[in-house]
Image: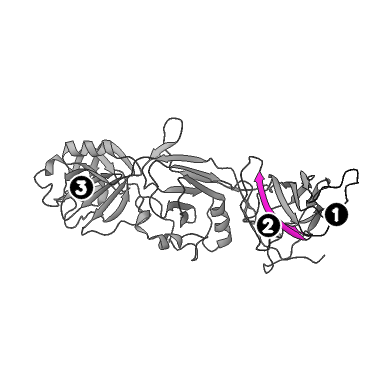
Amino acid sequence: MASRNSIKGWGALSLAAGAVLALNAAQPPAAGAAAPRTAPALVSVDACPAAGAPGLCAVPRRTVFLDTRRPPLTLDGRTPLGPLALSLRTPGRLADVTVTDHKGRRIAGELSADGTRWTSAAPLPADARLTARLVVERTDPGAPHRQNARLDLRTGAAPEGERLTAELGPTRDGGPGPQLYGVGQPLTAELSHPVPAADTEARRTVERALDVRSTPRVDGAWHWVGPSTLHYRPRAYWPAHATVRVHSALDGVRITDGLYGGPSAPLTLTTGDHVEAVTDVAAHTLTVYRDGREIRTIPVTTGKAGYRTRGGVKVVLGKEATVRMRGDSIGIARGNKDFYDLKVRWATRVTWSGEYLHAAPWSLDSQGSENVSHGCTGMSTEDAAWFYDTVREGDLVRVVNGYGEEMSPFDNGFGDWNLSWSEWRRGSALGSAPAGAAGPDTGALRPAL
């Protein structure tokens, strides 16, 4: 048989064809008559990619009877292979195909329009145990109308070498069970090896393997912040009281020549009420909403000229009952009239560079009437303590009607929500635009305060 085109894929694949579980003939044989013998359905097992890719597939396609148990068939190539394809070779159609791994997790795939070929959405991992269950509807004369079959598959071990893993976040020290976050909390994945923007196929492989599922279900996407960092967010905020599970299927997956995925710990988190604080800079107020209902309006002061508070949507990064704030942490030298060195109570952080919402008893006369701070949002000690107790990591702080620059998306906290959905999708290798549009891997800024 002629060789077929090949692209990057997965390693050697061996499979054992299982016996048919059930055959349901359209008409049972008459009493006393011998059951008619019909040719079993044939399915081809293929590990080569679609035509048009560079290179040649080193492994011939194998065709197996669906009602005969055979010793393992080996598709052993000199180069890694592509996605799994199961093609019906007898008249009829594949009414259903389900492929699962040894833990019962479903492998994504797509059935062709004519129902004769099923192809996995991505190359399968090395060293995997898989089960394919097929429902075949036969149309050839004398054949049973419906045939159920099972194929047990094995993939070869990945070669020795480096492994790409993903550290999934957010994470923090806490008790057993899922951690609770606000509805604005993005997910993060820190990769152990960089994947450059130019290698679009490798980025697609990584994204497909980082599976996010939420209850209730939402429409979301990964965004490449840099070669080693991805963020995930829904189109809108997470629903209140949702459960979000993140699982990495990178283990054994071929990323590039010589680099395969390794094991990564899964992540589960839950969201609380939809809590959003809106700072109106022009009105000098902070209004807090819970599930759309206003629960408190607080007089505040924000950044004065030269130190304007950033506008846009921010996410609570953490809380500190007492924090020391110094002017030199934001570039104000000692001896400058604007220099400060203060111990501040009930501080809720929204940027790594030191923007907080906190108690500012020294500016009570200005709260509600003018902006006199160095960029933070100041309020009375009582109001700051209430706000500190009310919000959690992942809750939203939105600054409107201000004069400062907009919050940047990635380099100073979680400004992810300041990108439109179309802009966000352009940072995905699976989206409609080239990956890597997000820019360099700048990381988080964490100055000492």
Report the residue marked by disc 2: 118
Q: Is residue 192 visible?
A: no
- Name, please, the residue furthest toward the bottom: 52
Q: Is residue 124 above or below residue 54?
A: above
Depth-wise, is mark 1 or mark 3 nearer the camera? 1
In magenta segment, residue 88? yes
Residue at 18% in and 45% down: 297
Q: Reply yes or no: does residue 306 show up in magenta.
A: no
User: Dot 1: within a 10 Å radius of its alpha carbon, few (fewer than 14), some, or many (20 or more) residues?
Assistant: few
Label 3 Cα crowd, 10 Å radius (few <14 / some 14-19 / many 20+): many
Label 1 SS: loop
Q: CA distance from mark 2 to mark 3?
A: 55 Å
Residue placed farthest to the front in the image?
Answer: 31
Q: Look at label 2 and name its amino acid.
A: Trp
Dominant secondary structure of the magenta stretch?
A: strand
* Residue ID for mark 3: 286
Say which element carries label 3.
Answer: strand
**Pointer 1: what residue?**
39
Q: Amino acid at mark 3?
A: Leu
> Within 10 angstroms of label 2, few (less than 14), some, or many (20 or more) residues?
many
* Cα–Cα gap, marks 1 and 2: 22 Å
Front residue of 178 and 194: 178
User: Which span is picked out in magenta?
Assistant: 85-102
